[in-house]
């Protein structure tokens, strides 16, 4: 019986993402449509599918690793892998548990990295939407009320916020979206592509649609009330001003910086 790790051309210490990537790469290379229905290639294709079915599942992979270890040491009757001695049994259990824990730890680490990457997209997007509602409903007039130095600081922060937000959006598009040409690209492509859950057009629609919706909600609330201007007339306006558009990128910038700092402290 062929070694599944050899079939997928990966190390026994490979992570789940490396195993998945290797399977997809080989699947494209050995797909029957690419090889004119060759029987030999079809058998290889079936072999990698069988290997991935086992190695792609954490529990099945642990069972498989256990069988490999038993097979490697079964030739010697005195081996700790075949001995019925209670100390040997305990040692075997420790080996199996460590291997299983290593696999689970790698999976948890990968999931944690993915969660952190997703948070780096969610926090700026949510803060942008919330800030758009607050800016248009509360109607702050900080920019026109402050001096020249204050205006320069606000403009610099606005530019920094725009650049930062653009970087986050770019990273999100690269990581989670595909353009139409990518979605329809044939499986026969030699280059490995990680599956992405969203189309680029849908992501753009959600981003701009959500921002415009939040602006609309804020304007609707602001048109119905002016309590902020009544409480602090020096800081809030009764009328809508163009400067309101300065604040959402600035708020997003600070929220994302605080989240990044908190994430580093958590590590």
Image (spheres, helix red, strand yellow):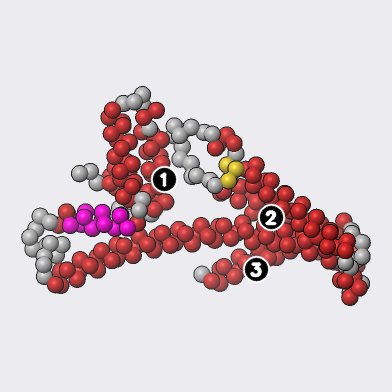
Q: Mark 1 or mark 2: name the one nearer the start of the chain.
A: 1
Q: Position of residue 132 (x, y in %)?
A: 77, 59
Residue 51 visible in image = yes
- Which residue is rendered at x = 46% and y = 37% of the image? 191
Give residue 34's quadrant in the image.
Answer: top left
- Which residue is rendered at x = 89% and y = 58% of the image? 241
CA gap between label 1 and label 2 equals: 30 Å
Q: Residue 76 versus residue 43: which sits nearer the camera?
A: 43
**SS type, badge 3:** helix
Q: Is residue 23 left or right of residue 68?
A: right
Q: Is residue 50 magenta?
A: no
- Which residue is rendered at x = 78% and y = 64% of the image? 134
Looking at the image, how many numbered discs can be counted on the residues?
Answer: 3
**SS type, badge 2:** helix
- Which residue is rendered at x = 20% and y = 44% of the image? 1
Tell me if label 1 and label 2 are in contact, CB under 8 Å.
no
Q: Is residue 60 magenta?
A: yes
The residue at which mark 2 appears reads as: 165
Magenta stretch? 59-70
The residue at which mark 1 appears reads as: 21
**SS type, badge 1:** helix
CA gap between label 2 and label 3 equals: 14 Å
- Furthest residue to the front? 224
The residue at which mark 3 appears reads as: 258
How dense is the environment of label 2, judged by Cα within 10 Å: few (below 14), some, or many (20 and up)? many
């Amino acid at each position: 019986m062929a070694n599944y790790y050899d079939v997928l051309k990966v190390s026994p210490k490979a992570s789940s993402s490396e195993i998945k990537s290797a399977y997809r790469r080989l699947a494209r290379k050995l797909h029957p449509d690419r090889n004119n229905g060759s029987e030999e290639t079809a058998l290889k294709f079936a072999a990698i599918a069988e290997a991935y079915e086992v190695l792609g599942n954490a529990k099945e992979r642990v069972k498989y690793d256990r069988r490999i270890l038993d097979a490697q040491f079964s030739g010697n009757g005195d081996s700790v892998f075949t001995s019925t001695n209670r100390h040997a049994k305990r040692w075997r259990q420790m080996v199996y548990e460590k291997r299983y824990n290593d696999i689970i730890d790698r999976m948890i680490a990968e999931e944690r990295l993915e969660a952190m990457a997703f948070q780096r997209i969610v926090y700026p997007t949510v803060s942008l939407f919330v800030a758009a509602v607050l800016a248009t409903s509360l109607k702050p007039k900080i920019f026109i009320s402050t001096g020249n130095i204050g205006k320069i600081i606000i403009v610099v922060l606005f530019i920094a916020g725009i650049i930062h937000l653009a970087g986050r959006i770019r990273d999100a598009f690269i990581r989670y979206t595909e353009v139409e040409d990518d979605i329809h690209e044939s499986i026969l492509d030699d280059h490995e592509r990680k599956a992405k859950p969203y189309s680029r057009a849908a992501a753009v629609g959600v981003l701009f649609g959500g921002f415009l919706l939040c602006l609309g909600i804020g304007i609707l609330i602001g048109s119905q009330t002016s309590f902020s201007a009544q409480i602090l007339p020096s800081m809030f306006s009764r009328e809508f001003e163009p400067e309101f558009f300065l604040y959402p990128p600035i708020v997003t910038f600070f929220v994302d910086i605080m989240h990044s700092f908190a994430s580093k402290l958590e590590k």
